[in-house]
């Protein structure tokens, strides 16, 4: 029993190193939020250009263009002035365009320099050497922070089409129109969501506090490890413009792999009747699940989910990460105390 805490300390040190290496990608590679009541999507690209891909990210908050052809894609600003050139020489941005500054912030809350002039000769500044770019195009998302669209405010219990939008581009002299739509849907009822999380936490707590042996706790460890792995595998694909595409995905997988390792070791200890070690593993796994689940907590109160898979699966996984994670921390502490006390030999009467 004395060796168990030492082993756990070694395991904790390894996990801390893994999380440090993973960095911000622990949460989700796809972006800043995991849920939203708004949702943006591209409905058509006309005409389609082979080698040019367009998509909206973050529920319409960001717009991405990847151009692998040998010809520039040109994107105008909001006054039809030259704004972007995306092509084989990288990305060039017109410093005289208001869009250069407005698109740096989600809500356009920036100061426009005096040098901006939509009628002036463009001043091109290279911002990337790769033929891909992501920006906040204010045509694709709702711009009033803290204020719902009028049709939504009038009837918040029903889904709405907020706007149909168009982002124009040109490719080698050919005009290309990217059309899409922005929708809004009512969020799930908190009376449905919160009881699920509380029930999961209660089950994990009961496994450590009330169960006769550590096996129920071991089974929950395996469920938690599986949830962490599914969460990582359904992480959305990162933007093409991210510095290291494969590295970002790998760093998102590291915490999940650490969680699976802890879950397997803890379940193995539980099946061998080593309740204190299983409890220690539950504490560690609970924290790992919370580290992965808390950045996605907005899934609980959002209509749309950012995940590479069904929304329902993403919601279930986040519920397991949060509810089971919190319960495993508390249940693991209880299990350590209970099973360690059982394992202690009785004190001889002479010593008493």
Image (cartoon, rainbow, N blue to C red):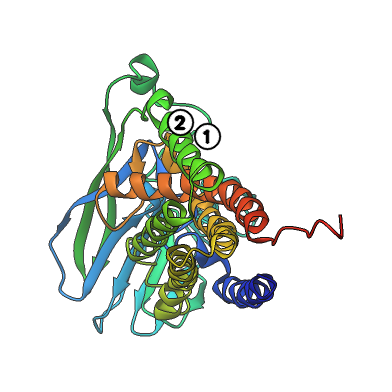
Task: Please report the residue visible at 23 percent of the width from the left and 55 percent of the height from the top.
Answer: 178
243 relative to 351 in the view: left or right: left
Horizontal relation, residue 337 to residue 73: left or right: right
- The residue at the far front in this view is 350
Q: Is residue 128 visible?
A: yes
Can residue 122 be seen in the rendering of this structure?
Answer: no
Residue 314 sits above or below residue 156 on the image = below
Q: Are marks 2 and 1 in contact (CB under 8 Å)?
A: no
Nearer to me, 276 or 164: 276
Q: CA distance from mark 2 to mark 1?
A: 26 Å
Q: Residue at x 45, y 60 (%)?
A: 28
Q: Which residue is mark 1?
A: 145
Q: Which mark is residue 277?
A: none
In the rendered image, the quadrant that contains the N terminus is: bottom right
Residue at label 2? 194
The residue located at (39%, 56%) in the rendering is 219
**Dot 2 lies on which element?**
helix
- Quarter-wise, where is residue 117 in the image? bottom right
Number of other residues with Cα within 10 Å of mark 2, as a class: few under 14, some 14 to 19, many 20 or more: some
> Residue shown at 58%/53% (left/top)?
332
């Amino acid at each position: 029993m004395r060796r168990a805490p030492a082993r756990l300390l070694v395991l904790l040190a390894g996990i801390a190193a893994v999380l440090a290496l993973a960095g911000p990608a622990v949460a989700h590679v796809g972006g800043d939020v995991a849920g939203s009541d708004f949702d943006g999507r591209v409905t058509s690209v006309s005409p389609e250009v082979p080698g040019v891909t367009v998509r909206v990210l973050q529920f319409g908050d960001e717009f991405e263009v990847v151009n692998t052809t040998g010809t520039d894609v040109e994107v105008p600003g909001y006054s039809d002035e030259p704004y972007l050139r995306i092509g084989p020489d990288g990305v060039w941005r017109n410093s005289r365009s208001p869009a250069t500054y407005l698109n740096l912030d989600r809500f356009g809350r920036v100061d426009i320099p005096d040098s901006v002039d939509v009628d002036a000769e463009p001043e091109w500044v290279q911002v990337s050497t790769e033929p891909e770019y992501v920006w906040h195009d204010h045509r694709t998302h709702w711009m009033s922070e803290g204020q719902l669209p009028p049709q939504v405010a009038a009837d918040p219990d029903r889904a709405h089409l907020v706007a149909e939008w168009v982002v124009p581009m040109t490719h080698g002299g050919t005009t290309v129109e990217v059309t899409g739509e922005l929708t809004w849907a009512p969020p799930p009822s908190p009376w449905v969501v919160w009881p699920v999380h509380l029930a999961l936490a209660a089950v994990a707590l009961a496994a450590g506090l009330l169960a006769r042996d550590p096996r129920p706790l071991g089974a929950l460890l395996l469920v938690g490890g599986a949830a962490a792995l599914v969460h990582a595998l359904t992480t959305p694909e990162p933007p093409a413009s991210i510095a290291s595409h494969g590295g970002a995905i790998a760093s998102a997988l590291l915490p999940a792999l650490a969680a699976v390792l802890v879950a397997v070791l803890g379940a193995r200890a539980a099946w061998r009747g080593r309740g204190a070690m299983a409890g220690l593993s539950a504490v560690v796994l609970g924290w790992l699940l919370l580290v992965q689940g808390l950045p996605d907590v907005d899934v609980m109160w959002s209509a749309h989910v950012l995940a590479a898979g069904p929304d329902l699966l993403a919601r279930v996984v986040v519920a397991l990460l949060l509810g089971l994670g919190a319960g495993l921390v508390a249940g693991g502490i209880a299990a350590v105390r209970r099973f360690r006390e059982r394992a202690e030999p009785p004190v001889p009467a002479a010593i008493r």
